[in-house]
Amino acid sequence: MEIIKVISLLLDYPEQRLVEASLELSDAVEQCFFLSPEQRQGLLDLIQHIAEQDLLDAQAGYLALFNRGRHVSLLMFEHVHGESRDRGQAMVDLLAQYEAAGFAIAAKELPDYIPLYLEYLASREQLDARTGLADIQHLLALLGARLEENNSPYLACFHALLQLAGVDPTEQIAELREQIAADPVDDSLEALDAEWEEEAITFMQGDAQSSCGVATPAANHRAKEEVAVPVHWVDFNDASNAAGKL
C-alpha cells in the first residue's frame, strides 16, 4: 500500500530528499481514498509543516520529539519489553519475519524501528498490511495519545495508521487519555541520563551485532530510494468496493 510508504517517509528523520519530494507525497495523499478527508488533510498539513521549515530546524524538532527518551520512541519493542531479554527474542522473531518475506534490511537497522516496519508492510498485500497495522494498534494509539498531548503535527501519521488498521483513531486515542494524564513525563537531562544508563541487550551475533539500547539518529533514520508514486485508490465512501479490495 503506497500510503503506508508515504507515512513511513514522513515518520523517518527528515532529509533534503523528503523536502524535494513534498509535491509527490502530497499528490499521493490526495489520491488515497483509503483515508477520510480529515486524515488526508492532517498528512498534507504535516508535509507542509516539514517542507516550509529550514531543514536543520525540522531535524532538530524531530530529534527533540522522537529521540528525547522513550516516551514517544519510534522503536516498537521499547514500549512493549523495555530493556528486558524478551526484547532480544522479539527482535529475532521480527527479523525472521522480514527474511521470510524477502525484505532485507541493513545490519545497522533496528528491526522494530516503526518507519522500517511500515516500509515492510508497504511491500505486502493490502490485507497483510492492514493486519500488520491492526497487530500494533494499541501501540499506535498510545503514541498518538502522547503526540496529541504535545500538540504535535506528527499525530496525523498515527491517526491515518489507525484508520488504515480499521479502527476509529479518535476513539482509540481518547481511551488512553486518562492513562497518559496519569503518566507524567520527566524529560529533564538528569532523568534522561538515568533512563539510558541501563545495560543494552544484544540480539544479533557476529559482525552484524546491534544494540537494543540507545538508537542514534544515524541508526534510526534511513535514506529512502524512491518517492511514493500515486496509484488508483478505492473510494473511502464506497464501502462495498473497499471491502472487495481489502
Image (cartoon, rainbow, N blue to C red):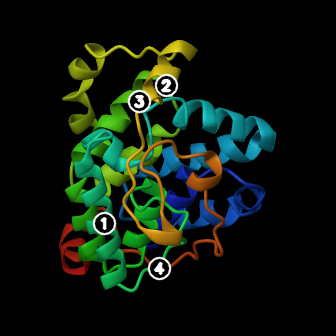
Numbered disc in front, either 4 or 2: 4
| Disc 1 and disc 2 in contact, CB within 8 angstroms | no
Numbered disc in front, either 3 or 1: 1
In this view of the protein, which residue sits in the foreground, 66 or 167?
Answer: 66
**Can you say whether 26 is above or below 189 in the image?**
below
Compare marks 2 and 3 and give the one earlier in the sequence.
Answer: 3
Residue annotated with mark 2: 151
For numbered disc 1, what is the local secondary structure?
A: helix
Q: Could you say where residue 91 lies in the image, as x and y percent from the top left?
A: 32, 60
Q: Is residue 198 visible?
A: yes
Kindly identify the amino acid type of the residue bearing the numbered disc 1.
Answer: Val
Q: Could you say where residue 106 lies in the image, as x and y percent from the top left?
A: 55, 71
Which disc, if any, is residue 1? none
Residue density around tag 1, few if under 14, some if 14–19, many if 20 or more, within 10 Å: some
| Disc 4 and disc 2 in contact, CB within 8 angstroms | no
On screen, residue 106 versus residue 173, left or right, reads right
CA gap, disc 1 to disc 4? 14 Å
CA gap, disc 3 to disc 1? 24 Å
Residue annotated with mark 1: 92
Residue at 29% x, 21% y is: 180
CA gap, disc 4 to disc 2? 35 Å
Compare marks 1 and 2 and give the one earlier in the sequence.
Answer: 1
Which disc, if any, is residue 104? 4
